[in-house]
Image (tube, grey):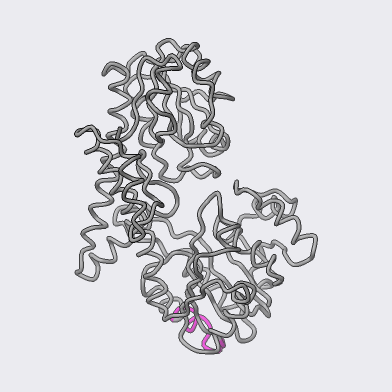
Amino acid sequence: MRIAMIGTGYVGLVSGVCFSDFGHDVICVDKAEQKIDMLKAGEVPIYEPGLDVLMTKNVAAGRLSFSTDLKTAVDGADAVFIAVGTPTRRGDGHADLTYVMAAAEEIAQAVTGYTVIVTKSTVPVGTNRKVQEVVAAANPTAEFDVASNPEFLREGAAIDDFMRPDRVVVGVENDRAAEVMAEIYRPLYLRDFPILTTDLESAEMIKYAANAFLATKITFINEIAGLCEKVGADVKEVSRGIGLDGRIGNKFLHAGPGYGGSCFPKDTAALARIGQDHAYPMQITETVIRVNDEVKKRMIEKIRDACDDRLNGKTVAVLGVTFKPNTDDMRDAPSLSIIPALIGGGAKVRVVDPQGKAEGDALLPGVEWCDDPYAAVQGADVVVLLTEWNEFRALNLTELAGSMNSARMVDLRNIYSKSQALKSGFETYVGVGR
């Protein structure tokens, strides 16, 4: 199959590379010339484990290329995927569809034969119908169908998620479009991975419902963690106890500083707005958004308490600033709420993150970047574990404690135990829900 992937952000680039590895001929298109030049030079503009190797392999095989020329890429394509950004529109929570509709109009002018135009971006219910209208208006003679094909990739594990998915969701209106999509995903079908073919609106809703549900699980266990602290329970034991129930499951039940990233904050806000627009408020989702904001504030208070309720003049070492490990993504990371509050309170903040500096430099003004945890904690008053990178899971706690001004640990990911920290020389250990 010939595929054009419009947009080389996280979703577009990972999807394009993986489709080429299926054996399809893929052209990834972006208006950003600098990004395309990087990709042509073999450089990957995002951090995703294994993506550079897979990209190099398929470029060498002649199945994958990069271009700024949308018209040439779309000409003769069996399917054109729209994978452009849909950021939250400032002020109202709506997903901004400006880039999606602009791409649809440009695609309409470039199609030369029957083409399936596939929305890969996360879009509100009803968007694919609008894409259909935009394409038809821009080119009344175009022979096309639209399809919805939401992505469910976890940053840091995206390639494995694409190659071994829990499910592939495809929304179509007729058999012709369904056949094209089936051929694109044929390698997965042959290995018996579930492929759910449904209508456009259901496919669009599945994406939002899935992310809202996962965000709810995270927020639920974070709220339970707060109560555990009041009653003397251990949230790690509670999570294990409820997670062993097959109806609940153990995933997304790890207490921490709240969810962040490119999907959950944006998609919960969009789902809440969709409910408001249809006079059917998403009350659970709206509460999840509010409670998640409160969780982040509670983390700030934990750090403040560890500093004897006075941040001014204190040195705080923060380990990890990306929203999760194995990514360089800083979008809506808890660190963007927590660190500015520390600096605003007068603290000096040192930061260590294996991949966070590229984006964090601009997003976290006023911090001092360090090369490793041991350098960051030299003379510090408190160390905060904020992102659970593997690099932070087996630290020499005795060495850390011995080099600090006051050996205090605020472990917002419950990586270590209180007994372990105290035995290693820390005078204070603060976890979440313990």
Q: How many marks?
A: 0
Quick check: 121 left or right of 115?
Answer: left
Q: 218 or 419, which is in the foreground?
A: 419
Q: Is residue 139 magenta?
A: yes
The residue depicted at 22 percent of the width and 38 percent of the height is: 227
Q: 153 or 430, which is in the foreground?
A: 430
Return the x and y of residue 390 as percentages of the image width and height.
Answer: 55, 36
Q: Is residue 351 magenta?
A: no
Q: Quadrant of the C terminus?
A: top left
157 lies above or below 227: below
Quick check: 186 left or right of 138?
Answer: right
Quadrant of the image occupied by residue 257 = top left
Return the x and y of residue 85 as percentages of the image width and height.
Answer: 48, 59
Quadrant of the image occupied by residue 407 = top left
The residue depicted at 32 percent of the width and 16 percent of the height is: 312
Return the x and y of residue 11 as percentages of the image width and height.
Answer: 54, 59
Return the x and y of residue 378 as percentages of the image width and height.
Answer: 50, 14
Magenta segment boundaries in residue numbering: 133-143
